[in-house]
Amino acid sequence: MHPDVGYLVLQLVLRDFRSRYKQTFFGALWIAGRPLLELGVFALVFGKFLRVPTNGVPYAVFAFSGIVLWSFFSGGVSRITRSVTAQGNLVANTPIPTIAIPLAALVSALIDTLLSAGVLAVFYFAGGGTVTWTAGWLLPLALILALLVIGLGLLGAALHVFYRDVGHAIDLILRVLLLLTPVAYSRAVVPPAYHWLYDVNPLVALFEGARGALVQGTPPDPASLLYPLAVGLGAVLAGTVVFRRTAPLFAETV
């Protein structure tokens, strides 16, 4: 890695944080507001209206891991996709290691997710949630999810420089994926006849594994993680190749 990349990532993260909450009344409290709103809406719609099965646990406990992981996935992919074009002036006028820009977007998304998780953890434990040794599985599950975020984000960032429609397409895909991923409900509500199609989404095994490890104390089947791991590695490879090959053209295009 270029010796200046780490410093540049840090500066970009700090600048992003300051710019997002400059001249706002609540400042960084907005980071906590979004997950709380999502939890409230999900609890009302899926917990009260639709009454999705939660294996007898309070909905705030049931949905905790899904909301946290989705916050990282959706926020990371969306931010990385728009990161290069958002720093257009910097890319066009300063000779910098371009890879630092999407890396900074990834770090910003991770920081927001960790802060949101800290806020939601209050409701998780207040609802009776516990932590056992199986919660250690959250780390490898999050790492596989990070591969998907990085790979899809790099691919989106490279294409977004040349085709701004990509940003709109990513937003639409994320909205659809939210409904096709066990964030607010479990895989159990999907009719068995459609499991083969539903499981094509590599996020399913990760989100189900995280919920089981955290809420039910059940470790995921390692074999079930091979598919999302393969997709994540493939995404990183494809995203890195496309980003590196198109990066020399960013300055004159962005």
Image (cartoon, rainbow, N blue to C red):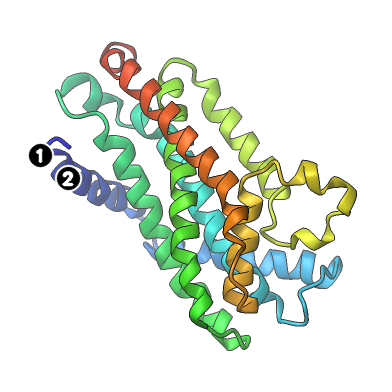
**Which mark identifies residue 149?**
none
Query: Is residue 110 left or right of 187 when viewed as pictured?
Result: left
Q: Say which quarter of the image contains residue 63.
A: bottom right
Q: Please say if 143 is above or below 243.
A: below
Query: Is residue 64 left or right of 10 when viewed as pictured?
Result: right
Q: Please say if 161 is above or below 71.
A: above
Q: Which amino acid does label 2 sit on?
A: Gly
Instruction: From the image, tell me which residue sits under label 1.
Output: 3
Q: Which amino acid does label 1 sit on?
A: Pro
Residue at the spot 40% in from the left edge and 67% down from the top edge: 115
Spot occupied by residue 4 in the image (x, y as percentages of width and height): 11, 38
Query: Is residue 149 left or right of 204 when viewed as pictured?
Result: left
Can you say which quadrant of the picture contains the N terminus? top left
Residue at the spot 50% in from the left edge and 58% down from the top edge: 141
For the residues labelled 1 and 2, the Cα–Cα distance comes to: 7 Å
Pick the residue in front: 198 or 36: 198
- Residue at disc 2, secondary structure: helix
Q: Residue furthest left?
A: 3
Can you say which quadrant of the picture contains the C terminus? top left
Residue at the spot 18% in from the left edge and 21% down from the top edge: 93
Pick the residue in front: 72 or 242: 242
**Which mark identifies residue 6?**
2
Q: Say which quarter of the image contains residue 52.
A: bottom right
Query: Is residue 20 left or right of 145 when viewed as pictured?
Result: left
Pick the residue in front: 99 or 187: 187
Given contact means CB atoms under 8 Å apart, are the residues at marks 1 and 2 in contact? yes
- Residue at disc 1, secondary structure: loop
Q: Around disc 2, counting alpha carbons within 10 Å, would you say few (fewer than 14), some (14 to 19), or many (20 or more)? A: some
